[in-house]
Image (spheres, rainbow, N blue to C red):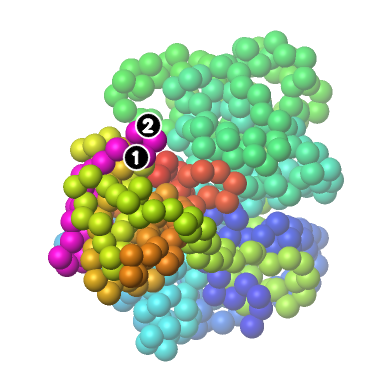
Amino acid sequence: MGPFEGRSISVVRDLSIDEQLYLYQKTREIKTGLKQGGEVEQYRIKDLDLAVYLMFLEDSTRTKESFRNAARFHRVTVIGFDAGSSSFNKNESLTDTVKMLVGYNQRTVFVLRTTLEGVTRHLESYIGEYARQNGIWVPSFINAGDGRHEHPTQEFLDQYTFLEHLDWRRDSIHLALVGDLFHGRTVHSKVEGLRIYDHVKVDLIAPPDLEMPAQYVEKMNTLGYTVRHFKSIDDYLKTSDKARLWYFTRLQLERMGDKIRDRELDLRKAVTLVPAHAGLLPEGTKLFHPLPQNRLYPEIPEELASTPLNGWDTQSQNGFYTRIALLGMVSGKLGSDFEGKAREQASYEPDFIHEVEIKNISRKEDFKTGIKLLSDGTVIDHIGIGLSIPEIWRLIDLIRRKLDLDYRSSHGVFDNSSASHVKGIISIPGDFSLTDRQIKMLAALSPGCTVNSIRSNRVIRKIRLGVPPRIYNFSEAVCRNENCISRSNWREPVKAEFYRSRDRDTFVCKYCDREHRYREIWESL
Ligand code: CP
């Protein structure tokens, strides 16, 4: 079993940088072998018990057909799922559909394109668990494009193409990204894909309605990329330091609101190359495009297809070779010679419980108006710091319900001792302590609060709860992305789950990667 067997690829970072470089190396060997009539038998899976299931619930030519042909190269079973005549029409969920399909073959690799975001991440957990419980080979799920989230296999073929063009040098890259940077999932995947280079300079060319979402720009800044912004190609061509690699992405009208669509022609003009621009491009420029181009409004004029500017035809052919290598890896055929750093598994250590030094102060000084002083019990203090009074009341109610605090007790909203803000307090008398599970929930609901344990009129332990590393199992927590698979209206068995970002003060949806400020997660506050 190779190190990649059974792995799912939902986003680019599901392969570490070394693993991505391994993919590019294998792609190079396979492409060279096929192009030059060399020996390629050692790369083939050759196992009809392995099925590659193509589930394209959104249109595709290149991705679907290159995966189909890559699977044929491998001499495995290739199955095209016909969504249009399936029981989706009887409202069957995607989860139930895949749960059934996974039992039809010895081993399965699912390649999915969906309008919903985060689907493959969900299936990896849910169907993976189901398969393990039922003695089925744990399937791989490959994201072939999900909404406007990511398109990792396009990113792999794009980076492979850039590397070929750069003669495999990875010291630096200067790339212009042009077009619908807001909706274009292929440009979002660039943020991670470009990490294989030592120095990255990215010029973003898009009018304000189509500009790259802030979370991706901030991520590029965090990664140390140099990022510049331009509103149109005309603007960009005035600068002296232009990129030689240009990557276009089409206007995704199907994902836009009516207001933006009304300005379609102006938006197109800003990001469409015209023949007159060609003479203003730096020498050696190559143009790339994930395709398709709209034949009525091509971003790159047809006249340029037969010029040395054309990098996009080689790029789309490379999809075939990179997908051969990727299928080889997740099937376990390739990988035994991998030497490098594997993908880091996130760890979620409970680093959010901080002991607070207990000061020897009179309990009377701590007395809160309206709360009976406890001789024994637990006081949850500083609830909802920073929230308004109505929000704190709702939070107290939520805490009581989620932690099942059905005891004789009292609660209220009070001035903090400094009186600079208000806070909630819940006071529970008796021989009572919060369980670990309750503490985790409390940290998720009200980070910053303290839990005071009082015995015989003395505070014997005080802890302050920080922001927890993971928020899950709360029906009140909701991803703000309406296209996220975790939204309850999609009726798939998924609950929202968030991870605290390592480098930024945000919570990231496990499924669609949407970043949230802490308060945004909670629908009911
Ligand atoms: N680049 C790309 O994803 O093309 P298709 O939509 O044709 O698959």
Classify mark 1: helix, strand or loop: loop
The answer to whether the residue labelled 2 contacts the one labelled 1, judged by CB atoms less than 8 Å apart, is: yes
Marks 2/1: CA–CA distance: 7 Å
The correct choice, above or below, for 301 with respect to 469 in the image is: above
For residue 87, side relative to residue 359 (left or right): left
Q: Amino acid at mark 2?
A: Ser
Q: Which mark is residue 420?
A: 2
Q: Residue at x 23, y 66 (%)?
A: 429
Classify mark 2: helix, strand or loop: loop
Magenta range is: 393-421
Residue 43 image offset from top left, x and y in percent: 70, 73
- Does 295 appear in magenta? no
Residue 208 can be seen in this image: yes
Which residue is disc 1 drawn over? 416
Between 157 and 387, the residue placed more toward the observer is 387
Between 162 and 432, the residue placed more toward the observer is 432
For residue 107, side relative to residue 371 (left or right): right
